[in-house]
Image (spheres, rainbow, N blue to C red):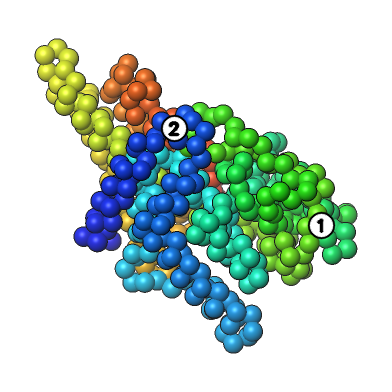
């Protein structure tokens, strides 16, 4: 894929109209008020039939999963991705991300964690019963999901430093621990909670990683109010506290066979979720970069200093040119994602890390240069580049910091 097709352009224009009609007028309230983004996201899904498409895909996947469970088809056949030959499905999911990120990247984070992490974890690792119980409602945004792995003391050492635990008592598990920086945490209906199984004689760093599906309101589960943060104000972030939360085997993602699996099974499941999240960052970065470039071009033509537009000065031209280079590079990475999807493939973990590293750095640099072009005005909240600069920075932090991406890329290179 080397450019957007006519159909893609039509979709982009339709989403742009939605953004102008539904998001831009409410941006102040979303960013600085107490309005969660979920109602607008549900309206987006309804307007473009995204919920119905998700439902149709889900029903096909469930049908294959049931056939695999009954032994009528091999299990690997049920998990196999099928490319559509065009990448339209991937494009349809990425285009709204790009356009939303022009104005409200936080909404994309809220949507992406619910659909791309919580729902994806359940639908890839859960039993058929678990998928039917929780997966569809998350995919359609009828319910909001959270994916809880980060802890106050772990940070980048997500698995080794994890303290949250599951103690087995007969056919039940007792969960204890806390999580922080959890997107959708304050409002989530369904939570994928990641913790370690208590195992006697096993070093805490080597214990099995388990995933449990929790529902809002369970005894012992506390979801805090939204935390205050630098950017992504439209994406509610909170903490979770678990005190003797009791879960049956039905809430253990994958069921009892998970306990019989190898030590790294739970880690691999979380790693796949990280890979999905990292791939989505490029689409977010593209929206931020495109908007910063458009705003900077407009300002460079209108802002006059020493009797001529500042766009006539070479230092400003260099900034604009570098922005365009970043836009082209990130767009090509997005195109590659779409093309791979059309062939039923995805990037490797290291490739997704490389894409995330470059896109996040480029978006942050472009947003800060946009502030520089605007000068004093760019530092003021009345101008959108101020918000985009704050929002872009988190792309270098969540889904693995830049430093973690470099480690993943280097380790892959050195292993060849």
Q: Residue furthest top?
A: 306
Q: Residue at x 85, y 58 (%)?
A: 168
Instruction: Using the image, determine if residue 105 lies above or below residue 116.
Output: above
How many residues crowd mark 2 within 10 Å: few (<14), some (14–19), many (20+)? some
Q: Is residue 80 visible?
A: no
Q: Which mark is residue 173?
A: 1
Q: Residue at x 78, y 62 (%)?
A: 248
Tell which circle, 1 or 2, labels the residue nearer the N-terminal end: 2
Q: 349 left or right of 1?
A: right
Image coordinates for residue 197, horizontal then vertical, percent: 79, 55
Q: Residue furthest left?
A: 307
What is the CA distance from the residue labelled 1 to the residue labelled 2? 41 Å
For the residues labelled 1 and 2, say whether their Cβ atoms are less than 8 Å apart. no
Query: Dot 2 corresponds to which residue?
Result: 29
Q: Which of these two is toward me, 344 or 124? A: 124
Q: Residue at x 45, y 61 (%)?
A: 51
Image coordinates for residue 119, horizontal then vertical, percent: 56, 58
Quadrant of the rendered image containing residue 169: bottom right
Q: 253 left or right of 314?
A: right
Q: Residue at x 45, y 52 (%)?
A: 42
Q: Quadrant of the N terminus?
A: bottom left
């Amino acid at each position: 894929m080397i450019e957007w097709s006519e159909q893609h352009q039509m979709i982009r224009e339709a989403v742009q109209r939605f953004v102008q009609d539904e998001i831009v007028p409410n941006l102040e309230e979303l960013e600085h008020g107490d309005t969660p983004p979920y109602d607008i996201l549900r309206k987006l899904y309804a307007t473009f039939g995204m919920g119905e498409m998700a439902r149709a895909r889900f029903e096909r996947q469930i049908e294959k999963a049931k056939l695999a469970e009954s032994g009528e088809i091999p299990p690997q056949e049920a998990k196999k991705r099928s490319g559509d030959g065009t990448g339209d499905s991937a494009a349809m999911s990425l285009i709204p991300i790009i356009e939303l990120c022009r104005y409200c990247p936080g909404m994309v984070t809220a949507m992406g964690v619910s659909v791309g992490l919580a729902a994806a974890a359940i639908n890839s690792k859960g039993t058929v019963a678990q998928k039917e119980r929780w997966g569809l409602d998350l995919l359609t945004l009828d319910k909001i999901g959270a994916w809880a792995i980060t802890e106050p003391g772990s940070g980048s050492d997500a698995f080794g430093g994890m303290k949250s635990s599951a103690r087995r008592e007969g056919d039940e598990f007792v969960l204890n621990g806390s999580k922080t920086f959890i997107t959708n945490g304050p409002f989530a209906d369904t939570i994928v909670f990641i913790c370690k199984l208590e195992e006697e004689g096993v070093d805490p760093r080597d214990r099995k990683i388990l995933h449990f599906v929790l529902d809002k309101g369970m005894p012992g589960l506390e979801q805090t109010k939204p935390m205050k943060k630098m950017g992504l104000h439209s994406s509610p972030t909170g903490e979770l506290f678990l005190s003797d939360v009791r879960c049956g085997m039905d809430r253990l993602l994958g069921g009892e066979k998970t306990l019989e699996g190898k030590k790294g099974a739970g880690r691999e499941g979380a790693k796949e979720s990280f890979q999905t999240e990292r791939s989505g960052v490029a689409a977010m970065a593209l929206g931020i970069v495109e908007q910063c470039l458009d705003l900077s071009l407009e300002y460079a033509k209108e802002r006059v200093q020493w009797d001529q537009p500042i766009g006539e000065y070479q230092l400003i031209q260099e900034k604009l040119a570098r922005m365009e280079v970043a836009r082209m590079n990130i767009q090509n990475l997005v195109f590659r994602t779409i093309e791979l999807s059309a062939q039923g493939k995805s990037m490797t973990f290291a490739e997704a890390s490389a894409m995330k590293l470059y896109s996040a750095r480029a978006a942050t640099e472009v947003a800060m240069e946009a502030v520089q072009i605007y000068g004093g005005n760019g530092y003021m909240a009345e101008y959108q580049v101020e918000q985009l600069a704050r929002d872009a920075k988190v792309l270098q932090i969540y889904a693995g910091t830049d430093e973690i991406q470099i480690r993943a890329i280097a380790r892959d290179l050195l292993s060849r």
